[in-house]
Every structure is written in C-alpha cells, then in structure tokens.
Amino acid sequence: MSRIIVDPITRIEGHLRIEVEVEGNTIKDAWSTITLWRGFETILKGRDPRDAGLMTQRFCGVCTYSHYEASTLACEDAFGVKPPPNARLIRNLIKASQYITDHIMHFYHLHGLDWVDIINALSADSRKAVELAKSVCGKGVTPYNCSETHYDAVKARIAKFAESGRLGPFANAYWGNSSYKLSPEANLVITSHYLDALAVSKLGAQMMAVFGGKNPHPQTLVVGGVTSVMDMLDPQRLGEYLFRLKEMQKFVDTAYIPDVLIAGAAYADEGLKGVGRGVGNYLAYGGFPLDDDWTQTLLPKGVVQNLGIENPMELDEEKITEEVVHSWYKGDEALHPYDGKTEPDYTGFDDSGHIKGDEKYTWSKAPRYDGLPHEVGPLARFVIGFAQGDEKISELVNFTLNTTGLPATVLFSTLGRTAARALEAKLVADYTENWINELVANIKSGDTRTWTRCKVPKKGRGRGLTAVPRGALGHWVNIEDKVIANYQAIVPSTWNVSPRDKAEKRGPYEESLIGTRMANVNQPLEILRTIHSFDPCMACAVHIIDTKTKEIKKFKVA
Amino acid sequence: MGNSKDSKYSHLIEKQYEELMDYCEVTMDRMERELPEAKFDLHETLKDYGVSRRDFIKWSSVMTSALMLPKAFSPMVARAAEDFSRLPVIWLHLAECTGCSEAFLRNSYPNVDDILLETISLEYHETVMAAAGYQAEENLHEAMDTFDGKYICVVEGAIPMGMKGKFLTLGPKGKTGYEVTKEVTKRAAATICIGSCSSYGNVQAASPNPTNAKGVGDALGIRTVNIPGCPPNGVNFTGTVLYYLLFGALPPTDGLGRPLWAYGMKIHDNCERRAHYDAGEFVEEWGDEGAIKGWCLYKMGCKGPYTYSNCPKLRFNDRMSWPVMAGHGCMGCTEPDFWDAMAPLEKPIADKPLPGFGIESNVDRVGAIATGVAAVGLAAHAGASVWRKGGEEEPKKGKAKK
C-alpha cells in the first residue's frame, strides 16, 4: 500500500489536498483536506445585517452571486419582508446568467482537460472532426463554430504551443495517459470549444452585469429587493440581456451538450462501472422561485438515499447537522481564535508529511443529513427531480439515456455528474426567457416596484436556503440589537468535501474515489476527473469558524 | 500650463518627454535582448482573431492615452505589446475567492487586451493549469529557475500571518502561504498584487482579522504595485504590465501603491450622477422616484467621494455596467480596510457610528479617506529602476504621505 499526496488539486476554486492509499493501482482509501481558513463568521459579528450579503459574497468569486442571494434571503427571513415580483424575477435573471456561465466554464476550463487530451488533438483529421460534430448535433442542427478551416486553425494554434516547448498552463501534464479515451477528432472538437467557451463566458458575465452591475460580485441585491430599476425599465437593457442569453443557449445546444454526449460515448464504460459513484445519498434545497412564496421552484427540493430513485423523500431541515471530530476545530469552547489560544484546533501534518487521517485533518466541517453524508450539486438535483417525476428533468434525462443507449444507473457516477451539469445548464437556459416575459408583463400591468420597504429589526433570526450551481446552500443569521450576533453557512462544497464523521463515514469526495483504478499512480488523472466532477469550491466550503462550535450542530428553523 | 508652444515651460516638458522616449528605447532594447523568445507572433495571432493591423494601431493609441502618455508614444506601446507574449508570469493564489482570476480571464472580448492576456506566458496558475500535485509543483520551480529575476509575480489573495502562517498551506510539503510567497516574490522582477486581498488584506483582514491576514507588501515588507478592487477591472492589470514592458519599471503610483493612471481620480469626479449630487437630488430609499430617475446615491451609502478608481470610466464587463449605474452606491472596494471604514455600506459616512469594531484608528482612517488622502507618493517615472525589496521606507497604508 502506498500513500499518494495530490496537493495542489488544480482547476478548482481554492486550496484542496487529496491523499489516497493505493494498493497495486487501485484506490483503497482517501482523505480530502482543505488547507485554508479565513474566519468570516467572526468577522460578520457586530455588523449591520444589510452588509452581510456583499460581505458573504466574497466567500467565492467563482460562485459569485450565490452567497449574495442566500444571505439576502436569510436577512429577508429575519426582517420578515418579501421582495416584490419584479425583484424575484430580476434575481432569477441574474442567477440564470450565473448558472449557465458557471457550468459552461466548469466543463471546459476546469474539468475539460481530464477528459480531453489536447496534444492528441493534433493528430486529428479536420474533415472527420466536422463529421463527428455534425453527428452528435442531430438533424438540421448546425454545430457550434464548426468547419474544416476552423479546426485546422485550432490545430495550428495548439501546434505552436507544442513546438515552442513552453506549454504555459498546459505544461507537464498527463497527455498520452492511457486513461484518456477520446479519439483525436473528438479531442479536437472539444478543444475548439474550450477556446470558444472563453469568449462565451465573457458574454455570460456581461449578462449578469446588465441587472447585477458587474461580474464577478454584482452589487444590486438589497434586503427587500433589487436596485437595478433603471435597467429594468430600459428596453435596450432587456435586449442586451436577451440576446446574450440566446447566444449562450446556442452554445449549450450546439457545443456543450453534444460534447458531453461525445464524452459519454467514449467513457461509457466508466459510467457503467459506476466509477466515482460516492455515497449514493442526494440532497437539494430548491431554487429559482416561480412564485413569490417559493411554493414552486424550477430546481427541485428533496432527498434521495441509497440510490433509491423509486423513493424520493421530503427535505426535513431539522435533520441537518455539522460535526467537527475530524476537522481542525475544538469542540465546546467559545474562544476567539485571534487571542492566541488553541482555537481553532489545528493539528497539522504527521512526521512523514501526511495528514493525520485518524485524527483531525481538514478545515472543512462535516455536514450530515439524518446522520449520513449526502452529495449535493446538479446530479443531486437531477436524481431528485427524476425521482419526483419532474417533467422537464425527466425529459432531459430520458433524452440523454435514449441517445446514448445507457441505463439510468449511469447517472450515479463521475460521468453522470458531468452530464447532469450540462443538462442543468440547458434546463436553466431554456426556461430563462419565461422570466423576461413575466417581467415585461408585470411592468406592462403597471407594477414597477423593485423593493419592499423594511427596516433592520432590533432582534430576529432567519435562514436562506437556495440551490446554487454547486449544490444546496444555506445561510443562517441571528440579529440582536440591530447587528449580527451570529452567522452560519453550510455551503454545497462543504457537504461534498466533508471529512469523516464520528461514525467514520467518509464524505462524498472521499467515498467517490474508493475502488478507482489509476492507469499510472504517478499521474493523478483519474483522481482529478472524479473530484472535478463535483465542481469543487474550497473557499466556499471553509468560510467560517463557529466559535461556539459543538460537536454536533443543530439548525433549528423558526 | 503655458499656451504658447515656445514657452520655457513647454520646452521643458518636451525635453522631459524626449528623455523619457530615449529611456524607453534603451529599456525596450535591453528587454528584448534579455527576455525569453516570444511564444507567439502577435500579428499572426491577431490575424487569426480577425483583428486588422489598423485595429491594433487604434488600440495602441487608446492604450497610450489611457496610460497618460503623449501620442508620440503610441508606436512604443505597440512595440511593448509585441513583446508582451514573452513576459513570463507566475500567479499565486493565497487567502482569496478567485474573483480576480475570474475577472482577469473574462475581461474584454474581442479586442486586443484579450489577445494580449492570452499570450502572456502563464507559467503557473492553479485555476487553469492542466497539471496538479507534484507536476504542478515542478512547474512552479522550473518557472522560477528558468526565468529567475525575469518573471512577474502576480499575487491574488492575502497572506494569513497568524498561527505562524499555518492558516494556509500549499503544496505537498504543506508550506505556508507566507513561505511560498516570500520565495516566489524574492526571485521575481516585480510583484503585482491583483485585487484588494493581496493589496491590503480585504475581507479576511476585516475586523477583528482572526487570521491576522495582511496584504503582500505589508506581510513581506516588499514593494508591490497594487491593483485593488474587489475584484478590479482586468484592464487595470493589462495597462500596468504594459507599462512595465515600456519602462522596465512599474508605473507611477500613489501612496498606496496604486497606479495613478487607473486610480488617480475619485469615483465621484467621473460619476454620471454627479450633476444630481451637485443639484441636491438624492435617492432616499430603494426604488423611489429618484432611483428611477438616476439620482445621486450618496444618501444610500455611496462611497464614491472617498474612493479612487476608474469604474465610472471603464465600468465592468466591457463597459456593460457598474454599481452606481445599476442603482447601488459604490462601496469603496479599492480602498484599504473598506469593510470597516465604509461600513455600514448603505449609510453615508456622515452617519457612521464611530465607536466601531474595536479599531483604535477608526476615526483617523475615516477622516483620512474622507478627505481624499491617498497622496501621491511618486516613485517610478523615467530613470527609476525596477522595484525590488527594500529601498525607500514603505509608505504606511491608509495614512497621508505629506
């Protein structure tokens, strides 16, 4: 048995270390460690609650908007205020731009190089590549930016990289590893879209800026509503949003989804074997409210356990807990960490330079639902939606399974996670125009409200639960004397990157690596491929310390 | 400024610029000799993108005036742009949120900035690089060895100093963020801090700063050029690197290390709602009549009068918008300690409760910022050498340099 360290895990947000025990070439055990702590909860105490949104947004710039929304919702819950319909719709529009852009960026720029061998693309035949792209696009659909000339140009650009000997960000990687399964033509098509996605991502960012003010870190949400009333009333602005949305939709339909289908076919084996499956429990909070009371949301809320899609469960917020037995925090002591005392409880590495897997080994806490680790993210939402018989989700899932000829069990894998993310991008992109129409209709009817008047209560508490691109996000705020007395967040990546709990159950990342076979133990390609499928965001996962931490934390909702 | 072309003053200015031009030439010649071979032919690459030579010339001219240089420098800027592809960059991520990388990677398309950014020799950048683990570590050290003394170190994120720096560890050996940054900046030609975190500490350093997080210059005691903002507009970064190529030095900065060309003016000075401020027309609550008419956001907490940056001019995301345009006041994110100094963000500074968060120098800081003091601590202009550790005494952040 040998122990392998992979640090830094690159092409994620934040600082992640993975250690695995390998026997022969197979992973037998795994630990996931976050190596940065910033201390937001302490920092938030004593501040005006209306500052919380902008501040917590800085948990993460990749997951921009996500915390801004959750924080604002938590405060609205605490203040007892409901934003007007236009505000809900504008928030959905901003959020939609985040989802679409984020998922595209993730597949190509963060995950892509685990599936695609860029150097191998050089041996592709451009004409065959055109045929391939057309074949996955369906009849009468023009593939994105697809022509022999263009593919030749893409090859030429990559060749320049390769010849110069200085590969920049592509240097010293895993090209040629036998775990890459795509044909040269497939590699070329997806590589060309990697480059296109750089431009498309910018459109997505501009889209967010129309109603958000800027990207990253928009600035137009306030407790009670939104501020971008002038943009709302300006048809040119609506147009600027709408026409970029169309361009994004085109990319999703004629590049992103087809590419995932190409990868699905080549890596079908891994899907069938369930490589990267993980804990088999899924959880989601629901997001994109379709009405002002959140009785219906575009993305589903619920729980599925033990791969049981025939038995979807209702979410019970009382069952959410957080443990710290294997995390670098002390239990029970309410000490300020900056006082030089032993709070937080950092125990570092052992003498051989490894994390202490049997003791405390990460800055991430261990969220549990019903005492069990649960995975969150697009796959969780799609599994839950599929189980609940959600029409749109079922249609997308069935389309994918029919096109690839693969069984539903393929969902429960790294491949499934990757496909779900693409399908979710399509789901959101296709629905978004409805919100624009609803907004226009509402304004036409004479309603131009963007804010419901509210004041900071002397005392109050509230929580904001919402679905964000990486999964289920919750913020909880306690207000006393008109300032923040306590602030908590359990973030999607915390669920996923979670260490073991008291019962020694592994977290989702850790569990998903067990049984994975590495083609070359010196090249962590397979580890990257599975970890990346969760779309890790480590700054999100460790944002706070709970100075009043107990071993098990219960979140009661009023 | 004298109106007559023949005035003594105008001759003086002309002479200064001539000397500057000569200095530029010498520097550029030297750099071209010393820098590694260009990875790309810029003009070929531009052609691939359908950018004509004329577009490129136009861009050079725009960049020249953005850098506040006379038109005669335009060919020089173009020449620097061609050299850009040779400049090796090592980018470190510390206590950060990756927003600055996102801003940088998404900034402006399809114009020339984008292409320039693409052709920087990005030797190490954890968000986009293909290699991980040991291979990534190898890349970092190889880049430092190969380009020793020549690479630009870009830092994103603050350095946690508490607990001997162990709030952040990097790499297989678990080195602290402090150790890694010290090593990489030491061997760099220059260090540029992108974003408010690496510039001054930002959110993790906000009161009570539980990890004792600091900006890079502060933590290491080195001179850095700071491109603050949370995140900043990527163009503020491009222009600064371009300046480096032109002059072999970093651009003139204020007392807070911010390039004057981008941070020399207050938001308030260029704000499209300024006329409303002057006319006393204010938004009183969100979504009111004033909000619909685009009135001044001062009463809703806009910190534009106290903040130095070019947001109203360049805006964000290809000039799509910026906070004030979208109806929310500026929060002062290019200023040190803004989370404390500008808080509460929705209230004007005049209403700020001063017994605040246990920071003794609260009043001073607010006063200093309120009177617009980020004084000019002019450093690099013609004749200045490349900034390294040491040299003049570091100006104290947030205080006036008289």
Image (cartoon, rainbow, N blue to C red):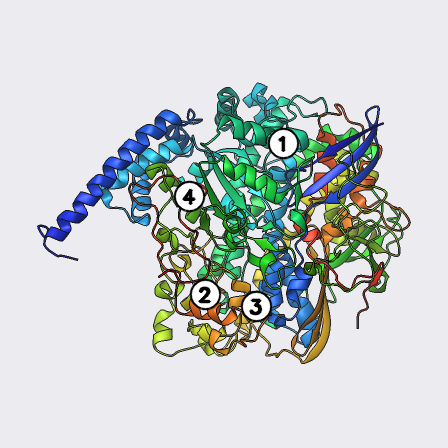
Disc 1/disc 2 C-alpha distance (Å): 43 Å
* Residue at image location 48% in from the left, 57% down from the top: A239
Identify residue for label 2.
B324
The residue pinned by badge 3 equals B359
Residue neighbourhood size for the residue with mark 2, other residues' Cα within 10 Å, grouped as few (<14), some (14–19), many (≥20): many
Asked whether residue A209 appears in the rendered view, the answer is: yes
What separation in Å lies between label 1 and label 3 (alpha carbons)? Answer: 40 Å
Disc 4 secondary structure class: helix
State which quarter of the image contains the C terminus of chain B. bottom left
- CA gap between label 3 and label 4 equals 35 Å
Instruction: Quote the CA–CA distance across marks 1 and 4.
Output: 27 Å
Query: Which sits earlier in the primary sequence, circle 1 or circle 3?
Result: 1
Q: Does residue B272 appear to the left or right of A23 in the view shown?
A: left
Q: Earlier in the sequence, mark 3 or mark 4?
A: 4
Label 3 vs 2, first from the N-terminus:
2
Q: CA distance from mark 2 to mark 4?
A: 24 Å
**Label located before the other in sequence (1 or 2):** 1
Q: Label 4 is placed on what type of residue?
A: Thr
Q: Chain of mark 2?
A: B
- Above or below, A544 relative to B121: below
Q: Residue furthest right?
A: A503
- Label placed on residue B238: 4
Q: Nearer the viewer, residue B218 or B103?
A: B218
Specify the amino acid type for callout 3: Ile
Crowding at mark 1 (Cα within 10 Å: few <14, some 14-19, many 20+) = some
| CB atoms of marks 3 and 2 within 8 Å | no
Residue designated by label 1:
B137
Query: Which amino acid is tagged 2?
Result: Val
Q: Chain of mark 3?
A: B
